[in-house]
Image (cartoon, rainbow, N blue to C red):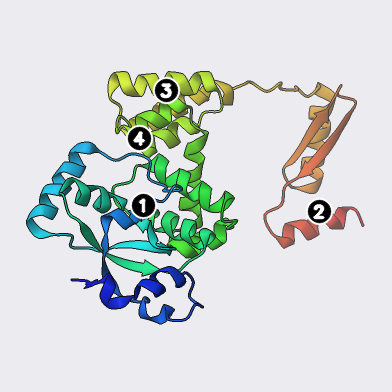
Amino acid sequence: MGRGLGAILSSESKVSINSATDKGAEVLLGQIVEVSLEDIYPNATQPRTYFDEKALEDLAQSIKALGVIQPITVRKDGERFEIISGERRYRASKLAKLTSIPAYIRLVNDQELLEMALVENIQREDLDSIEIALTYQRLLDEIGMTQENLSQRVGKERSTITNSIRLLRLTPAVQNAIRGGEISAGHGRAILSLDSSELQRELFETILKEGLNVRQSEVLANSLKAPSLKTPKSVKVLSNELKKAQKRLSDVLEVKVEIKTLGNGKKGKIVLDFNNESELETILAHFK
């Protein structure tokens, strides 16, 4: 698949070419080359923090049979190469006892390296919702993107990004449950709809205990919120005199009249209802 690194670079240029402006950099751009695994090292800021050992073993077996189908992407760093994307393929290739791996070589600075690694990470289909949310947050904090910039960069709606980042407000126990597949991000959003940490804990425990789906969790969340929504408001009853005044005004103006008292009942306001401009003109005519 790839050309040997020696066919692309001389020993001198292997050291001297480190940026796109260096002489001879054009020979690297767009090339797939075979790079020794000994010359490659992982990205210390790699967004992915968990690698399933069983999945790596399966990938290693596939590589033994078919080879590395998709090249990894690396950044040239002196005589060595830092991984931008493809650490799973790199790890599996080592398990498969390969000595080299096909790679695209990029010439980027530290910030570009982090941005490329983070954005590439988001595009993966096997990431859990919390890892995606953490990646979004890193792009905002460490790269300095706005949510609008991020939306355009990763091709996601801004609301999708906002809802994802909100998951980071969940307790560590709930986040771990999402990462472990016990509950989904939808369950997490239902839990976040509750303001009280105690109610959030109660809903979370009920979801786990009863195996509620997302819709059932949302219904339960609404029922837990209901008591706070049904706090009775004090109702002020009009005196007989005000009721009579309300009726007299309604009869004279020929519209519905409502007198509302404020505070201790000594102050208030009169509300006149009208359905169209004609009725408004009729009301105004009484004041002329």
Q: Nearer the viewer, mark 2 or mark 4?
A: 4
Locate the C terminus by quadrant: bottom right
User: What whole-number distance in Å separates the C-alpha atoms at marks 4 and 1?
Assistant: 27 Å
Which residue is identified by label 4? 179
User: What whole-number distance in Å separates the C-alpha atoms at marks 2 and 3?
Assistant: 54 Å
Which residue is identified by label 2? 283
User: What whole-number distance in Å separates the C-alpha atoms at marks 2 and 4?
Assistant: 65 Å
Locate the N terminus by quadrant: bottom left
User: What whole-number distance in Å separates the C-alpha atoms at marks 1 and 3?
Assistant: 44 Å
- Residue under the point 38% across and 29% down: 176
Could you say whether the residue bearing mark 1 is in a helix, strand or loop? Answer: strand
Which residue is identified by label 3? 203
- Give neighbour class at mark 1: few <14, some 14-19, many 20+ (Cα, 10 Å): some
Type of amino acid under label 3: Leu
Residue 211 locus on image (x, y percent):
28, 24
Which residue is identified by label 1? 41
| Dot 1 or dot 3, earlier in sequence | 1
- Give neighbour class at mark 4: few <14, some 14-19, many 20+ (Cα, 10 Å): some
Report which quarter residue 13 is drawn in.
bottom left
Q: How many marks?
A: 4
| Dot 2 or dot 1, earlier in sequence | 1
* Disc 2 and disc 1 in contact, CB within 8 angstroms: no
Q: Nearer the viewer, mark 4 or mark 1?
A: 1
- Residue under the point 81% across and 22% down: 239
